[in-house]
Every structure is written in C-alpha cells, then in structure tokens.
Image (spheres, helix red, strand yellow):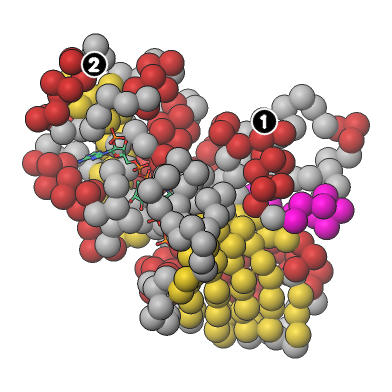
Amino acid sequence: MGVNGYGTIGKRVADAVAAQSDMTLVGVTKASPDYGVEAAARRGYDLYAAVEDRAGEFAAAGVDLTGTLGDLLDAVDVVVDCAPSGVGERNAPVYEAHDTPAIFQGGEDAAVAETSFNARGRFEAARGADAVRVVSCNTTALSRLLAPLDETYGVEKARVTLVRRGGDPSETNRGPINDIVPDPATVPSHHGPDVNEILPDVAVDTAALKAPVTGMHTHSVNVTLETDPDPAAVRDLLADEDRIFLVPEAAGIDGAGALKEYAADAGRPRGDLWENCVWEESISLTGRDLYLFQNVHQEADVVPENVDAIRAMTTDVDAAESAARTNETLGVGLESRLGDDGPARAELTADD
Ligand SMILES: NC(=O)C1=CN([C@@H]2O[C@H](COP(=O)(O)OP(=O)(O)OC[C@H]3O[C@@H](n4cnc5c(N)ncnc54)[C@H](OP(=O)(O)O)[C@@H]3O)[C@@H](O)[C@H]2O)C=CC1
Ligand SMILES: O=C(OP(=O)(O)O)[C@H](O)COP(=O)(O)O
C-alpha cells in the first residue's frame, strides 16, 4: 500500500502499516522537501512526489525521489490519502484514473467515499470497497464508546460536549491562543451526524468548542441508556474494549499532559495514545443517565482504524481478527497496573 501525504497522520499510518506482517508499505509522498523527508529516509521508506509539478523542489534540495504519485498508485493495491482536509477530495479522481482503491480521512466529506469506517462500529461495509473514509478522531472515539453501550444497554440519547484542541503541537499557525470558543457556534456540531455515518440508529447530539491547547481533545459525555446498569457493569464493559484505556484514579493522571507523559513512559512511539482515555472515576450513573469524561489523542486514535480499513478493503479477514492483529502488532490496549485489571508489578516486562 502507499501513503499519499506523509504528515501528522500519514507518517503514523505508514509506521503502523510497516509493522503489519500481512502488509507492505511501498512508499509515501510529500508535497515539499521539508524535515519530514528525513523521517521517511530514516525508516527506509521510498519517497514520491505528491504533486508532480513540484518534483523539482526535491531535486533542488538534494532529495532523491523514487517517482511521482502516479508511479506509486501503479505500484500499490490501496492508497491511504492523508492529505490536508479537503485535498483528498481533489485527489480522488487521480485514484480513480489509476484504478487504485483509496482510504480517505475524516477531514473529507462523507460523500468522498462509498462508506465511512470505524473498526468497532462499521467494518463490513468497507469489504471490497473502492473508496472508504476513516472518520475523524472525535468521531472515532465516540463510535468506539457508543457501539458497546448501544449493543449492551441500548442508547436512548447521547449528548456530548467536545472541547477540542486548537491545533496539533506542530501547527504553530492555529489557535485560539487566549480564548475558548464555540466552534462551530451552531448546535449540534457536525460530529453527531458523523457518528451516524457509523452508527445510524444511535441518537446523538454534539456541541463543540476549541481551546488553546494542542495535546488532546476532551469529551464530556452523557448517555441516556434504555436500561439502568450499575457503574461497575459499565466500567467492566468498557474495560473489555481494547481501544478504550480506563485511566485509574490511583494513577493520578489528571489531564492530557500526564496522559502523554504516561504514554511516553510506556514507550509509545511519539507518545501516541491509540486508545480512548476514559477517566475511570468519572463513570457514573444517575438512573439511566451515564456520565463520563474521555480524552482523545487526535494525532493517533485513527491510526489503527486505517490499518483495519486496509484489511476490510483488501482481504476477507473479519473485524475481530483484524483488530486483534492490529492491536497485537502496535501494542494497542494500555492497562495501568494501578487499575483493577492492570498487570501486577511482577508481571510487568520491559515492553509494558
Ligand atoms: N491532525 C489531526 O489531528 C487529525 C487529522 N485528521 C485528518 O487527516 C488528514 C490529514 O491531516 P494531517 O495529517 O493533520 O495533515 P498534515 O498537514 O499534517 O499533513 C498533510 C500531508 O499531506 C501532504 N500534502 C500536501 N498537499 C498534498 C496533495 N495535494 N496531495 C497529497 N499530499 C499532500 C503534506 O505534504 P508537505 O508536508 O510536504 O506539505 C503533508 O505531508 C486530514 O483529512 C485531517 O482532517 C484526522 C484525525 C486527526
Ligand atoms: O478534530 C478533528 O476533527 P473533528 O473535530 O472534525 O472531529 C481532527 O482532529 C482534525 O481537526 P482539525 O481539522 O482541527 O485539524
């Protein structure tokens, strides 16, 4: 497969694909010969020009290219488009011209693909598809949370407030710098309808803000269930989800900064958190109303989803097996030894 757009998401998807024994990363593309080319070179990834007219910039910078986007498309059985939001849609005709199935990201409108994708909530719809859209980080996290709740208890209505990061750490041109703003000011935000691209029968209203932070998004979640389980049962249900990390109260992790530090200490590449991070002590019920807080690492949580989307499109591997393979190769499924289910100190290994 190939990655068209070796940026924040693209470089992570490239590494995740390269780690799969049943996949081959043929190469990646960039539009400009900036520092990202060194990351690709260190990993031995063949580099292609995303924009043919700009290939000369690479030669001028002394950067060797293997070819252009067209060459890459002719060499792969699927391309993962990780271009900036809205650019993927412009790339779609090129993929079609090369008869190369494509995976798009959440910055594209749902109409760019035959189906939106989330391994937990909507896997089979991507089987054999020519165009699939992996929903964005927020929608990925909400789909992972609402799918087991709806399956087990029924969801009467979900209401979520999203406090989104203003931009990624490397994006110095974004904000807000000194404000917290409704974004969009209209309610509901686009996130609810995006969740319905994955879980069409779940009623969910979302309201979104942007804050002057870069590390992670934070969700304040309220779900009215159709039954009234006890909090321990909900906790156990979420604990069984490999892509949900229950942050134990005893760990003293109080926000994104500590979460990212925890991930780095755990040896995660780039300090990435592929999992939803749910504060365990926040899980509470008032009658049928469930409440919890979760953090979302926007740069990372869509990465295992892209790997599973490739399998859904190009193989007959089922959802459970694909997720198990992806989780095993990447090491998805954080558990703190300070939590009830965590490995005892004696069981911890250097890889934990
Ligand atoms: N960042 C995030 O938090 C998340 C992003 N997404 C989605 O993922 C997608 C990518 O976002 P992100 O990784 O942040 O973007 P970045 O800006 O970090 O990376 C975009 C990459 O695309 C390359 N590029 C530029 N123009 C083209 C083109 N015409 N064709 C192909 N590649 C091109 C850029 O090359 P160069 O660097 O050389 O200019 C860069 O490598 C978007 O749809 C976004 O909405 C989804 C979830 C979270
Ligand atoms: O928050 C995100 O998308 P979403 O809010 O549309 O779910 C992604 O992190 C991409 O966000 P950006 O388009 O502000 O970089």
Separation (CA) of disc 1 from disc 2? 33 Å
Q: Is mark 2 within 8 Å of ligand 1?
A: no
Assign a secondary structure to mark 2: loop
The residue depicted at 28 percent of the width and 57 percent of the height is: 108
Residue identified by numbered label 1: 267
Image height of 94 relative to 253, above or below: above
Q: Is residue 305 above or below residue 177?
A: above
Which residue is depicted at the point 18% across and 15% down?
59
Q: State the image quarter where residue 213 is shown.
A: bottom right
* Side of 260 relative to 282 (left or right): left
Q: Nearer the viewer, residue 5 or 33?
A: 33
The image shows residue 274 at horizontal and vertical percentages of: 57, 45
SS for callout 1: loop
| Residue 135, label in figure | none
Q: Is residue 13 left or right of residue 255?
A: left
How many numbered marks appear?
A: 2
Q: Which residue is mark 2?
A: 61
Vertical comparison of 107 with 152: above or below: above
* Residue 253 belongs to the span the image colors magenta: yes
Q: Quadrant of ligand 1?
A: top left
Residue nearer the viewer, 213 or 159: 213
Residue 245 appears left or right of 119? right
Q: Is residue 40 left or right of residue 85?
A: right
Question: Residue at the spot x=62%, y=34% of the render?
Answer: 268
In the rendered image, residue 9, in percent from the top left (x then y), is placed at 41, 41
- Residue 152 colored in magenta in the image: no
Per the rendered image, the range of residues in magenta is: 242-254
Circle 1: residue type = Gly
